[in-house]
Every structure is written in C-alpha cells, then in structure tokens.
Image: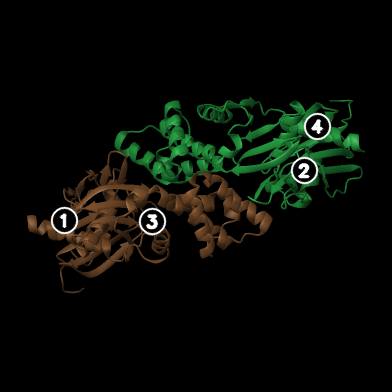
Chain colours: A brown, B green
C-alpha cells in the first residue's frame, strides 16, 4: 500500500475480533485484523487498539466508519439503536471520543425493535451491503449465525426482524450437557438431519425428549456421533423454521452466508417448498460500510 | 449404632455422590454419605469406597443392595437394563465382583425402552418406593430433575416412560450462553413464569426467539433477572408439558419431589386442569431399596 494514503478506513468491530480495511473509495487497499474484540477492551482501549491495527496506513488523522459491538453499551461509545421500521441503509452515526488530532471515528447504530423486543448490531451493515449489491430488493433476508436474524426488508426499510439463538443453543447443548458423550464435534448424516428437521418442525414441544433420545439411542442402539450431531442440528433448525414461518412463507428469501450453515438453511427451506437464493457473505460487511461512506459523502 | 449389627446395607450410588444406610429390617440405624460418586471412580475403586463409607457398621461381611449409576457401563459392574414393559418392583439384580470375604453386593438394574429409546437408572427404585407406600397405585409418576421422567405405571408394571432433559437445558442455557447476563441465578416472578408457560405450551417452535427476547427486553425495557429467570423456566416447562401431554392428559398424576421444582410442575399441571398429588421424595429411594430387600428375602 506504500505511497497511497487511504480515503478512509472501514472497521468491522465485533465482540471477539476486529477487522479493518484501508480504502480508496470503494476499493480496499489493505486489510488487517486482530483478536482485540469489544469483549476484551475498556472504552479507553479502543483508540490505541485502532491505531495499532492501522499503523502504516496513516500517521493518525483518518476518517473511520465502524460497525458492530464497538457501538454497544460496553463498547467504545454507545451508538443508540435505530428503532424499526427504519432505513435499511444506516444513518445517524455516533462519533466516538478520540484524542488523536484529525482522527474522526463514526459508529453505525444497531437496530432495535420494541415488540417483540429484539436487537441487532452489525447485521444492519450486512443488510446495507446486500442492498448495495441488489438495489430495490424486497423480501426476507436470513443471516444465519450464533444468533440468526430473519429480517423483513421492503422499500429500503427494515420493517421487522426476529432473532433465533439457535446456533448458540446447538453449540451449548451439544458440548455442555450429557449430550457431549453422544454428539460428535464432526461427522454428518443428511438423512439424520432430515429426520431431525421433521421432528422439530412438527413436534417442537418434544425437543427436550428428542435430545435425550439421542443419548438413549447411542446407549441402546449404537447411534453414531455424526448422525446424532446431524439430528440435533435438524431438530433445532426445524423448530426455528416453524417459528420463523411468518417470515419466509410466501416471501422472497435470501440467505446470506457461505459454507455449511447457509447450505443447511437452504436445504431446509427447499424441503418446505420455499426456494431461496444463497448470497455469499464474503465482503458483504465491507460493501455495507462502503455504502454508508458513499451516503455520508453525498450528504456532506 | 454401637452393639447392633445391621441386617443389610442400602446404597444409593449416583454419578456425583453416594449415600448408605445401615439397616435393621426396614429401619435405618445409621447413615453415611460421601462425594465418591460413580463419575470419580474406576471399577476397582468401588469396593474400597464402600468399605470406607460403612466402616464401623461391619468388619467386612454384609449384604448390600445398591441402585443408581453404580450399575452403569462405566460403574462397578454393568447391571443390564430391564426392558419395558417390566415389573415396577425391580428384579434380576447383578452381583458386583468383590474380594472381601462375606461381602455380597447386588445392584438393581435400570430400565430401558427400545422405541422411543429411553433409559433410567435410579428412578426405578424411587418408583418401587412410591409403590411400596401406595400399593396398587395406577397412573403416571413424574420425577422432576435434571432429566425429568414421566412414567406410566399400571398393574405393578412400568408400561412406558419418557425423559425430558428440561432441567439440564434450563441450567445450561441460562448460565453458558449470552443469557447469563440477563437471567439471574436467584429471584423469581410467578406472573412471568405463567407467561413463559403459555409461550412454551402454545408456541414451542419459537423457543430460540423467546429466549433471545429475554436479552433484548433486558436491554430495551429493563426486564429484571428474576422475571427473566421465571419466564425462561416457564417457557421450557411449558414445552415439556405440551410434549408430555399423552402422559398426563386424563390420567392420575403423582409428582415426586420436594420444594420449588415439584411445586412448579404441580402449578403448571393445575393450570391445564390436571390436578396432581405431590409426594415428598425424602426417603423414597430408601423405601424402594427396602422393598427390593423384602422381596429378595421372600424369594430366598
């Protein structure tokens, strides 16, 4: 990147990690990341952490746009939530306190919903990135993850959304309970996934019994760790699909993500007669940060 | 206990703890316990642990009847499961290998069910104790705990049963996920419990969203830790009640246990129009061990 001074710096600052890009307009010139996530920092630690991470790109002065948990109450500075319905292109950024002359850091607000109560921080920027790539798109965006978001987007607004903490429930129950002796950390079985999916969709109330059954089938009938893992995954995902039905039924659905998990959502939705497109999540946060930067340029 | 030599020794040997009673017929003369549960012992450690625990009651020779995880595959010796339907008074005890002359240790088998696959170890002895106190009883016994059992008992047989690992799911999700910042380890709110109960009974598929809502309501609306705890508890118990409906609907129900948890099951069942009796669980395992001892005396 020698010789080129970036126009601005884009930052995706999550709970566990932080990632920054030196930007020339919409084009990344360089990239850096570290494990100095929000969870490890006190408010006064953010500025030095950012300067450390971007050393060589600037001698201090810079325009920075950041998204994610950096704007949480326990972050650098609280960036108050935008309340739904709200523009799917974030606005109302909060300036973080800095001591370095010329350093201007703006944090993108998360989005909150009053009833049913729900919050997101970071996903709003992925949504902005998706819309930048797919202008005028109308429908439901599913962002699978630890806390999966189902988001209804219409006329460039986030109309409503719902979070299912299915990913964290799966990870915790399969590793921190008696199931850890039964459910493998690897291995898979598509047929077992489909069985679990049906159990979760049609008899969600039996969850705690179906889970214990995995243990019993292992003891009595030799159920293998990969099949147990796939069935538990299908069970919990089936419950989520049944719970999120008002979101996906009869709507255009896009699943954002790459690899295994996005594929499971697509497979499960297809089994309900809802085809969806899978949009690769790589670069989508950066596209969202860029969209916000472009907008700020227009309006200033 | 000086001067009286026990007829036999009763042992309740679980995963975490072991408890023994010196018995004169059905009457306990002395009691001892330690934390040398099955989980901490290799097969060869059980005999010394038992001799340690019962020192002073006998100089070695003794008749011992034990129940619980001591008979698991990883225990002292595997006591193969009785398969349902099976007598609700355990039979077919397995003799544990011993080196002390005159020491005769018999382990009560657990009960297993092939389809849906399920297992119990220890609860069969509590059921035997309940039936010893309530001869001829017919109906459903609910044994709340980490892994709650619903057991259909008729004509002195265990006809079928189902385990819901609701207790472990609750404990794990409220302490090992993002909910630990929101859900208190103490505090309670009956009204919040009832709201959660309805959510779980009637919309179990939304579990992973309802749980995340606790976090969001805490952030947005100041939901307190006691109310969050009660609502999470109601939600998961409501799901279990809906899942176990074939067990309790239109049947005589007895909940075995004392204190808070048994009371919650009773309250939840009453809200569904199913009154139940709550039988204090204190001493019920010992009553079951005594019933087995009496039976062995009759048949030898």
Classify the position of the C terminus of chain A by image quarter.
bottom left
Report the residue marked by disc 2: B49
**Residue A17: % across, % down:** 34, 57
Q: Nearer the viewer, mark 1 or mark 4?
A: 4
Q: Report whether A184 appears left or right of B60.
A: left
Q: Circle 2 — which element?
A: helix
Q: Which of the two discs, 1 and 3, labels the residue nearer the N terminus?
A: 1
- Cα separation between marks 1 and 4: 78 Å
Residue occupied by mark 4: B290
Task: Quadrant for the N terminus of chain A, please.
Answer: bottom left
Q: Closer to the observer: label 2 or label 3?
A: 3
Q: Residues within 10 Å of mark 1 (few under 14, many from 20)?
A: some
Q: CA distance from mark 4 to mark 3?
A: 53 Å
Circle 3 sits on which residue? A145
The mark found on residue B93 in the picture is none
Q: Which residue is mark 1?
A: A103
Picture coordinates of residue A261, whole percent (x, y): 41, 61
Q: Give me the chain letter of mark 3.
A: A
State if disc 3 and disc 4 touch (CB < 8 Å).
Answer: no
Q: Chain of mark 4?
A: B
How far from the left and from the top, in percent, is residue B174? 47, 41
Q: Are marks 4 and 2 on the same chain?
A: yes
SS type, badge 1? strand
**Local crowd at mark 3 within 10 Å, few (<14), some, or many (≥20)?**
some
Which chain is mark 1 on?
A: A
Disc 2 vs disc 1: Cβ atoms closer than 8 Å? no
Spatial CA distance of label 1 from label 3 is 33 Å
Query: Element under label 3?
Result: loop
Mark 4 or 2, nearer chain start:
2
In front of the other: label 2 or label 1? 2
> In the rendering, at what x and y percent does residue B213 appear?
37, 41
């Amino acid at each position: 990147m020698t010789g080129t001074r970036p126009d601005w710096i884009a930052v995706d600052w999550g709970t566990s990690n932080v990632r920054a890009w030196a930007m020339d307009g919409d084009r990344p010139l360089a990239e850096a990341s570290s494990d100095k996530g929000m969870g490890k920092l006190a408010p006064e630690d953010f500025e030095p952490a950012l300067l450390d991470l971007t050393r060589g790109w600037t001698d201090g002065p810079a325009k920075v746009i950041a998204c994610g948990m950096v704007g949480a109450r326990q972050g650098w500075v609280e960036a108050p939530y935008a309340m739904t319905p709200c523009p799917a292109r974030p606005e109302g950024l909060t300036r973080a306190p800095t001591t370095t002359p010329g350093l201007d850091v703006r944090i993108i607000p998360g989005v909150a919903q009053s009833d049913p109560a729900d919050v997101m921080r970071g996903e709003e920027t992925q949504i902005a990135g998706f819309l930048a790539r797919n202008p005028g798109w109308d429908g439901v965006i599913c962002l699978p993850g630890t806390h999966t978001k189902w988001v209804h987007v219409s006329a460039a607004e986030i109309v409503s959304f719902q979070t299912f903490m299915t990913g964290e429930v799966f990870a915790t129950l399969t590793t921190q309970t008696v199931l850890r002796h039964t459910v493998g950390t690897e291995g898979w079985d598509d047929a077992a996934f489909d069985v679990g999916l049906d159990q979760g969709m049609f008899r969600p109330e039996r969850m705690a019994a179906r889970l214990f059954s995995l243990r019993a089938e292992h003891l009595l009938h030799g159920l293998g760790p990969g099949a147990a893992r796939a069935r538990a995954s299908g069970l919990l995902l089936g419950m989520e699909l049944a719970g999120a039905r008002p979101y996906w039924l009869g709507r255009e659905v896009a699943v954002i993500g790459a690899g295994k998990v996005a594929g499971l959502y697509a497979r499960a939705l297809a089994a309900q007669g809802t085809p969806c497109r899978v949009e690769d999540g790589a670069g989508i946060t950066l596209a969202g940060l860029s969209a916000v930067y472009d907008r700020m340029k227009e309006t200033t």
